[in-house]
Image (cartoon, coloured by chain):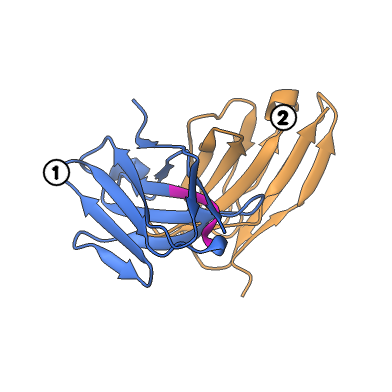
Amino acid sequence: NAGVTQTPKFQVLKTGQSMTLQCAQDMNHEYMSWYRQDPGMGLRLIHYSVGAGITDQGEVPNGYNVSRSTTEDFPLRLLSAAPSQTSVYFCASSYPQDRAHFGNGTRLTVT
Amino acid sequence: RKEVEQDPGPFNVPEGATVAFNCTYSNSASQSFFWYRQDCRKEPKLLMSVYSSGNEDGRFTAQLNRASQYISLLIRDSKLSDSATYLCAVNKGGGSTLGRLYFGRGTQLTVWP
């Protein structure tokens, strides 16, 4: 009963490096999203997808890319990491109008 | 104006106290409402969905007021284990944003012995 699986759990990057945060769900949810959470800022939506092949920007999309080639996977790519991207990243999935199921999060530090 | 506004607190209450959180939302077309609980350094987990008629789950009661566009969470007989951050979430619904949840910033609750 995996639910939403995020990898890696922790990551340290140097400024300018790129990487991909992985997110997979096994619940056949149409809707997937990426959030970042910073102290005092709550959850801020980066990108979301309403189905395979469809993605859209959230509140804070700059510096991030996404794609949705399958229903199950929704990777988040950091193109050129910056210290401002140090954060905790959560992936979530849901049926439309339904509760969101979250992954365990990825703690990213950019030095 | 933010889609969802929530008092960040912190709320510090003794065990046994009753505490209430409110959350306002800006879009009258919003259709689904939730309360999440988040423990330190963990992912948010659903506490309750909020229904138009109000709903209760043990010590927790959630209410929706569509006319005033707010949802509330009432915790009775607070326990030490209730200490966490409580996030409200609203689904605006419709069109290309179907499924998109807007979260409040969270209200921090500490219950002390």
Work out which quarter of the rendered image holds the N terminus of chain A and state it: bottom right
Colour chain A appears in: orange
Q: How crowded is mark 1: few (under 14 residues within 10 Å), some or many (20 or more)?
A: few
Question: Residue A23 at what x, y percent from top left?
Answer: 65, 53
Q: Which chain carries label 1?
A: B
Q: Residues within 10 Å of mark 2 (few under 14, many from 20)?
A: some
Colour chain B appears in: blue
Whether residue A88 can be seen here:
yes
Given residues A55 and A95, the one toward you in this image is A95
Given residues B17 and B93, the one toward you in this image is B17
Which element is circle 2 on?
loop
Question: Residue A24 at what x, y percent from top left?
Answer: 63, 58
Mark 1 belongs to which amino acid? Answer: Ala
Q: Mark 2 lies on which chain?
A: A
Question: Residue B9 at what x, y percent from top left?
Answer: 46, 38
Q: Give the range drawn in magenta.
A: B82-87
Image disc number at residue B49? none
Which residue was labeled with disc 2?
Answer: A79
Work out which quarter of the rendered image holds the C terminus of chain A and state it: top right
Given residues A70 and B65, the one toward you in this image is B65
Residue drawn at (49%, 55%) of the image? B14
Residue drawn at (69%, 24%) of the image? A84
